[in-house]
Structure formats: C-alpha cells, structure tokens
C-alpha cells in the first residue's frame, strides 16, 4: 500500500477528543491543553531507507531523526519543547554506536532548546533486524500560529527558503538545519497563510499545500532555486522539483507581504518567490512562457 | 550494551531546559508548559521481541504498543491526551495488515480518550526488515500527581494491582488493560508516594522503585499474587517475581492508607499488600519466616 493512501485512510478514521484541534494529515497535530496550543509530531529514520549506517554512521541517524521532527515543528511555526526517541538496534550495534545515536539526537535537540527527555532502546532478536530511530517532538505555539497546510488563498505568493535538489548527493539530507527561527519570523511578521516543510519533494509538498487549501498553484521554472548539489544532475530543475529531503519551508502569504519579505531579507537563509496561488486545483509549471501540468510526485515509500 | 547501562548513561548526559521537571529515568518525562504538567513517554514493539506477527497478528502489535505507552502514563497517575505512532513495515506487510495495526492502536487509544493524532508509515528497503511500532503518548497531570518512582519512605506499605507471572503463556502481555483510572484513584485518594508499572518484572521494577527513593524493600513471598497463567510454572513465585510484562501498578503509600485501600476496595482490580519499605538499600524476600536476598533481575534486552 502506498503511504499517501494509508495516510488518507488514517485521516478518515481519525478519532477525536476535546483536546484535538488538528488531527492527522498536517505536519503536526495541534492539541489544546491548559490554554496552550501544543504541537506533536512523530517521524522515523530507517537504516537502508533514510540513512546508511556504513556510509553515514550512527550519529547521522540520530541527527537526522531529530532534525526531521524539528522540521515538522518549524512547518507549523512552533517552538520546540522536548523530544523522546525509541531506538531499535540491530545485532551489530555497539555501545559506542548507541552513544553516537544519542549524541546525534542531542546535538540537534540542544541547538533548538529541545532536550531529549526519554525513550527506549531495544534490540532485534534476529540478525536481520536493522536500525530504526523514531523521534517524537513536542512543541508549542507560544503565541504564533500554528500555521497549517490549509489557508493559502488565490493571489497569495508562493515562497520557499533555501534551494532544492540533490540533497542525497550532497548529504544535505543529513546536515540540514530545521528552519525553526525562520518560521517564527515568517509567521509573526509576514502573515504566512499556509506552510509545509519540503520532505518528500517540492512538487509533491506543493500539491499537498494546494490540496489542503482547495486551491491551485503556478510555479515559474526560472524562479525555482536549484541547490549546488543538483547543478550537475541530468535535469537540475527536475531534481529540484522531485528529489525531496530538502527540509526547507514552502509557504504562501499575501503578495504585498512577499514584497516586504524579499525587500527586508530578515532571515538567515535566502527566500525565493517561486509562484502564485490560483483558484481551482492542480499544479502548473510555467516554463519558457508555456504552461504545463506539474505532476505532484516525489519520493514516496511503497509498502 | 545492556539497556540499563545505556539508560544510566543517557540520564547522566541529559540536557535540560526550563520546561523539564523530570527528565529521562522515570516512566514519563514531566514538562511544565503553560501552567499544566505534561507527561511524555515513548515505547516500541518489535516483531520477534515483543510480539510475533505470525502468532499474534498485526492488530496485536498496534494494541500492545499503545497499551505500553498508556501504562507509563498510568504509572505517573496521569490523564492521557493523545498519541502518535511510527510504523516501520517489513516487505510482506499488506495494506490490510497496516489497517489492522492502526485499528489495534485505535482500539486502545479510544478506550482511554487518547486519540491517535499523527505518525508515519515507512517500509524497510530490504527483505530482512521487520515490523517496528513506536508509540509516544502525551498525558497531563490534571491536578493529580504526577507520582514519580522516587518518594517511597521507610514504613510505607508496598502494594500491587492484579497478579503476576506467565504473561506470555496466557497472552496477557497482549490483552492487558493499562491501569489509568485505577492510578488516578490511588494518587488522588490514597496518598501514593511512589509508583511504577511492572513491565520488566516485579523484582526488577521494585528494585527501580527502591533505588529511586534511596530505600530498601521487603517482600513477603506469601503475599505476592500469582496469576493463573503462572500456576503451572515450575516455580510460580519465581514466575511472578521475574517474568515481567504484567503491566500492573506497583506503589508505596503510608501504612494507614494501605489499610483503608484494602478495606475500601475502590478499584476495579484487586490490590495486594506485598511488603514494606525499609531504610537502607536492596531487596529482601521473606519466605517461610526466613530472609533472603531478592535479586532485582527481570526481562532485559541485550544489545
């Protein structure tokens, strides 16, 4: 079964309670507890899928797992509070490896005031079991947002932080810095109406943003920032649109606010205006003055 | 490396922040956010270690993962708020299996007003990868507790809910009901001073309770409630003390309060008074009027 289908199914089944403001289907759940809006997100890093122990080492697995969770908190413009992690360890994992995974988790958490406050370590019983690191990050709105995927309105500008494509080639998928402070600034000062972090690919995540808002989106090929890692790709634009694992922010905001944002340049990372939100549905790529359908595809797990 | 050593090491390394009231090393972390005390706990169920897909089925994996997390919330006398889950799926896992895992998570969550609000499903890339279900439960104190592992004082009675031993033989490790409402009553009305849920074994978890409080504990062999599942064991008492996966509550409280509790019988599950907290350290088993050392051992992962 495809991951998207499963998520759709889960969303349709979702139970709710008084505390749940936003359930499955956004970057984080939003929970109303004691007057504070809490954010909760779980993500995992699997050996051989998201990281290679032999090529990248155990610390990279911990680092990436924590950073993926923090990137989800950033996507809602949240403030991290704390994280917990479970580690399923293959037979060959040593004590030193376990410490390196922990150090990796910690190094990212500490940089964002998000301490690792608990978890579990268990070993697979057979030789085939491989490393799985699952991280849950708890965040809070802290008076800003939360910014959801839905909310983009026709006429709003579409912007991104950073550049796209070739994240695996350049190992950016291991070293990326979650855009936590950037997202706070965007939401607090620039009226961001919808936001997502680009994990599965710019096109597919733009498709999610558009679908969530019940709108269409148009992207100018010339305006898509291409990462240095993708310059040598056969098709650098396709790499930027479809590779995924960039962990940059994709967001919509009123056109005037986008002008202000680009002029002011308040973030530590470049911002590019890649297109516009339109009425309707679906994604359009404008290349050399011609309009073509942009397929909302990307890096996707099959099960 | 042994799990206990690793946890000790993690505890020694633990980062902290203003929000962290209790970090790694208890059943849940305790976080102070927006004036409410939040509880956060992560746990996992691995195929071949905690569950067998072929013998128990996929729904049992989901159910057990959720119930383990809720049992940790119960151990602090917390109220569940919501949970998130990650599923790492082996190649053979079907869409129907994934739905069954989700149904298993949901069936336990719904019974405790703890909706599943998000998560991630990913597939192992090679044939050797096996099912891992990781669940994080967010809870809150809601004006009661949180009851920690530390706090047992010499002279306090030691009590347990339910009965112990043979949880795998009778499949109680899959069907147990987390003691959430029972723990609320114990903490609110009976001055419980320390509490833990018995996951790794009565003796080892009693050792943790004693160590956390800087006290010793004495257990009367005749008073340990032995589960029906353990009656046919070679040594039923040893099964009750060391098997683990009972997911019952073990707690300390003032002797007078224990009298009240036993007399009133307010819980839906039986309570037994198995011993007493003493000054010093270590565990003692009193059997046929003779005192012997009770080793704090149980079911433990090796990595």
Image (cartoon, coloured by chain):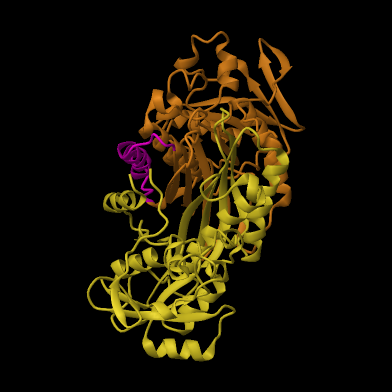
Chain colours: A orange, B yellow
Report the quarter where the N terminus of chain B lies: top left
User: Which residue lies at the image location 72% right of the left edge and 44% below the top edge?
Assistant: A9
Foreground pick, A69 / B52: B52
Report the quarter where the C terminus of chain B lies: top left
Quarter-of-image position of residue B201: bottom left
User: Which residue lies at the image location 28% right of the left edge and 81% below the top edge?
Assistant: B154
The answer to whether residue B50 shows anywhere in this view is: yes
User: Which residue lies at the image location 53% right of the left edge and 67% below the top edge?
Assistant: B230
Total numbered badges shown on the rendered structure: 0
Indicate the position of residue A154 as horizontal and vertical percent values: 70, 35
* A106 part of magenta stretch: yes
For the record, the magenta segment spans A90-116
Secondary structure predominantly adopted by residues drawn in magenta: helix
Q: Is B292 located above or below residue A152 in the figure?
A: below
Indicate the position of residue B145 as horizontal and vertical percent values: 43, 73
* A272 part of magenta stretch: no
Q: Is B223 located above or below residue A76 in the figure?
A: below
Left or right of residue A225, residue B217 in this image: left
Q: Is A273 located above or below residue B83 in the figure?
A: above
The answer to whether residue A140 shows anywhere in this view is: no
Identify the residue at the far right of this view. Answer: A280
User: Which residue lies at the image location 49% right of the left edge and 11% below the top edge?
Assistant: A231
Foreground pick, A77 / A169: A169
Identify the residue at the far left of this view. Answer: B280
Identify the residue at the far front of this view. Answer: B234
């Amino acid at each position: 079964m495809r991951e998207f289908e499963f998520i759709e199914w889960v969303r349709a089944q979702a139970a709710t309670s008084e505390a749940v403001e936003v359930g499955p289907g956004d970057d984080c759940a939003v929970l109303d507890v004691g007057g504070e809006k809490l954010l909760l997100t779980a993500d995992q890093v699997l050996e051989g899928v998201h990281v290679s122990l032999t090529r990248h080492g155990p610390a990279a697995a911990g680092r990436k797992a924590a950073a993926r969770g923090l990137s989800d908190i950033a996507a809602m413009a949240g403030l991290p509070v704390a994280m917990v992690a479970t580690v399923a360890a293959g037979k060959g994992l040593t004590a030193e490896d376990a410490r390196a995974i922990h150090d990796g988790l910690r190094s990212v958490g500490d940089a964002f005031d998000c301490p690792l406050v608990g978890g579990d370590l268990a070993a697979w019983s057979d030789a085939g079991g491989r490393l799985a690191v699952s991280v849950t990050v708890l965040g809070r709105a802290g008076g800003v947002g939360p910014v959801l995927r839905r909310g983009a309105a026709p006429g709003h500008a579409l912007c991104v932080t950073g550049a796209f494509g070739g994240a695996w080639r350049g190992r950016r998928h291991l070293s990326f810095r979650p855009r936590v402070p950037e997202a706070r600034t965007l939401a607090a000062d620039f009226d961001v109406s919808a936001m997502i972090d680009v994990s599965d690919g710019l096109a597919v995540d733009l498709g999610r943003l558009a679908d969530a808002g019940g709108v269409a989106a148009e992207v100018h090929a010339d305006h898509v920032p291409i990462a240095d890692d993708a310059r040598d790709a056969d098709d650098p634009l396709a790499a930027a649109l479809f590779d995924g694992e960039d962990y940059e922010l994709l967001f919509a905001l009123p056109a005037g606010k986008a002008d202000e944002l680009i002029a002011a340049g308040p973030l530590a990372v470049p911002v590019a205006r890649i297109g516009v939100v339109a009425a309707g549905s679906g994604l359009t790529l404008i290349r050399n003055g011609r309009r073509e359908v942009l397929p909302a595809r990307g890096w996707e797990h099959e099960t």
